[in-house]
Structure formats: C-alpha cells, structure tokens
Amino acid sequence: MEGEVDMDVKIGPDTVCAVSQDVVVRDIEGELIIVPLAAGVGDLEDELYTLNATGRAVWSRLDGKKSLSDIAGELAAEYDSPRNEVEADVVGLAQELVRRRIVVASG
C-alpha cells in the first residue's frame, strides 16, 4: 500500500530512491524547505526540514531512476572527491531520509 514504510528495506548503493508524495518541497530564498504533509512523516507532525548544499545536491538527483551508486558517481566526479567516501555519505543520507519517510526506496 502506498505510504506504508517497510522498515526492513535495506538501503545500499544499488537502492533507488524518490521523493515521497507525503512531502512538499519549496526553495525559499535559496534554502530548500521540506514540509511533511502526513502524520508519521518526519519526527513530529509540524516539523520542517532543510538540507545543506551537499544534501541538496543529492536531493536533486533522487529521481526514482538512478541508484545511490550512480548519484555518488556523479557527485564524486563533479566535486573531484573519492567515490567511496561520497557513496558512504549518499547512502547515509538516504537511510536517514527513508527512515523519516521523506523519500521512498526500492531495489
């Protein structure tokens, strides 16, 4: 059922993530604001989320088609950073966003 979270989903490099339909995202004066629309999304019902520049770079690529490994490869090339470190950071962020039900995962 849509909206349900499978807490057994393992997030790894091959996971594909997309933004949840239970959030609204707005760019306000250069800051990305994520607003949960449904109870149980995020930690508190009325909590807002923001992402730093690195988080925004990942967020903009969570299209439901690219794997986290693909996203890490793009970012590693763009920022001339070690791919393994970038991949660990991308997977870690995705795990947190999935845990909070801000993004959904498959694969």
Image (cartoon, rainbow, N blue to C red):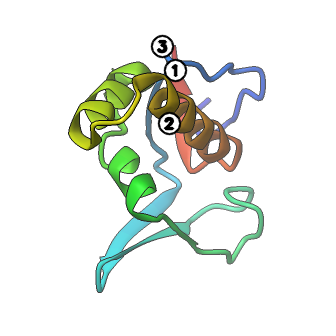
Viewer-closest of 59 and 73:
73
Sequence order check: which comes first, mark 1 or mark 2? 2
Residue at mark 2 to residue at mark 3: CA–CA distance: 12 Å
Q: Which residue is mark 2?
A: 90
The residue to which callout 3 is attached is 14
Q: In the drawing, does residue 17 fall left or right of residue 45?
A: left
**Which residue is at 31% across, 40% downward?**
61
- Separation (CA) of disc 1 from disc 2: 15 Å
Q: Nearer the viewer, mark 2 or mark 3?
A: 2
Q: Amino acid at mark 3?
A: Asp
Image location of residue 106, percent across then percent down = 52, 20
Do the CB atoms of the residues marked 1 and 2 lie less than 8 Å apart?
Answer: no
Quadrant where the image shows the N terminus: top right
> Of the residues shown, which amino acid type is indicated by label 1?
Ser
- Image height of 17 relative to 51, above or below: above
Look at 53% across and 54% down and name the residue there: 22
Q: Position of residue 107 (x, y in %)?
A: 51, 13
Circle 1 residue? 106
Quadrant housing residue 91: top right
**Percent of width and height locating residue 59:** 39, 49
> Which of the marked residues, 3 or 1, is nearer the chain's N terminus?
3
Q: Of 29 and 20, which appears nearest the observer?
A: 29
Q: Viewed as shown, does residue 66 lie left or right of 95?
A: left
The kind of secondary structure element at disc 2 is helix
